């Protein structure tokens, strides 16, 4: 079955960096677009970044453009989210997501807290 396991969340000071990882299994990773979402307390889950199956195709929410970079390693079945210049408003649970055969799959999430 599809499994997505996120890691890398932590408490970091404003201006700091983190790299999130999502290890995928149970489907042919190389054939699927991958997404990172986040959900802050009291807010709806929002799409942060997305990456296509190959090549340079990426999407970023306006709030993270120029600070976050999504990438993937198709040999390791892993998608990454490099987050730089972190702000307190980036505090959220970050989720990995894939849509396969019309069904949306989610990991359990990893907590990112940006605070002094």
Image (spheres, rainbow, N blue to C red):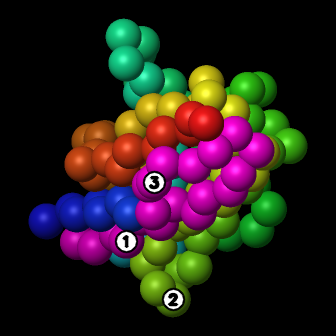
Pinpoint residue 32: horizontal percent, then vertical percent.
Answer: 47, 61
Q: Which residue is tagged 3?
A: 10
Quick check: 49 left or right of 28?
Answer: right
* Cα–Cα gap, marks 2 and 3: 26 Å
Asked whether the beta carbons under mark 2 and mark 3 sit within 8 Å of each other, the answer is no
Q: Give the total number of marks visible in the rendering.
A: 3
> Relative to 51, is 74 above or below?
below
* Cα–Cα gap, marks 3 and 1: 17 Å
Q: Nearer the viewer, residue 9 or 36?
A: 9
Q: Which of marks 3 and 1 is nearer the N terminus?
A: 3
Q: Earlier in the sequence, mark 2 or mark 3?
A: 3
Q: Earlier in the sequence, mark 2 or mark 1?
A: 1
3 vs 1, front mark = 3
Is-magenta flag for residue 21? yes
Pinpoint residue 74: horizontal percent, then vertical percent.
Answer: 53, 80
Q: Nearer the viewer, residue 94 or 58?
A: 94
Asked if residue 80 shows in the view, the reply is yes
Asked whether the beta carbons under mark 2 and mark 1 sit within 8 Å of each other, the answer is no
Which SS class for mark 3?
loop
> Relative to 85, is 48 above or below?
above
Quick check: 105 left or right of 65?
Answer: left
Residue drawn at 32 percent across, 47 percent down: 109
Q: Which residue is tagged 1?
A: 23
Pinpoint residue 55: horizontal percent, then vertical percent.
Answer: 76, 68
Is-magenta flag for residue 25? yes
Pinpoint residue 37: horizontal percent, then vertical percent.
Answer: 48, 37
Q: Which residue lies furthest to the left in this view?
A: 1
Q: Which residue is tagged 2?
A: 75
Q: Nearer the viewer, residue 67 or 17?
A: 17
> Which residues, given as a range, are shown in magenta?
8-27
Say which quadrant the C terminus sits in.
top right
């Amino acid at each position: 079955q599809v499994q997505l396991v996120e890691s890398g969340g932590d408490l970091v000071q404003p201006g700091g960096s983190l790299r999130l990882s999502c290890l995928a299994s149970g489907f042919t990773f190389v054939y699927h677009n991958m997404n990172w979402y986040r959900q802050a307390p009291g807010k709806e889950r929002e799409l942060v970044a997305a990456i296509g199956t190959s090549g340079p195709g990426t999407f970023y929410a306006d709030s993270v453009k120029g600070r976050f970079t999504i990438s993937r390693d198709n040999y390791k079945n892993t998608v990454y989210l490099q987050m730089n210049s972190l702000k307190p408003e980036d505090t959220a649970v970050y989720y990995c997501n894939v849509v396969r055969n019309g069904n949306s799959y989610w990991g359990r999430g990893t907590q990112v807290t940006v605070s002094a």
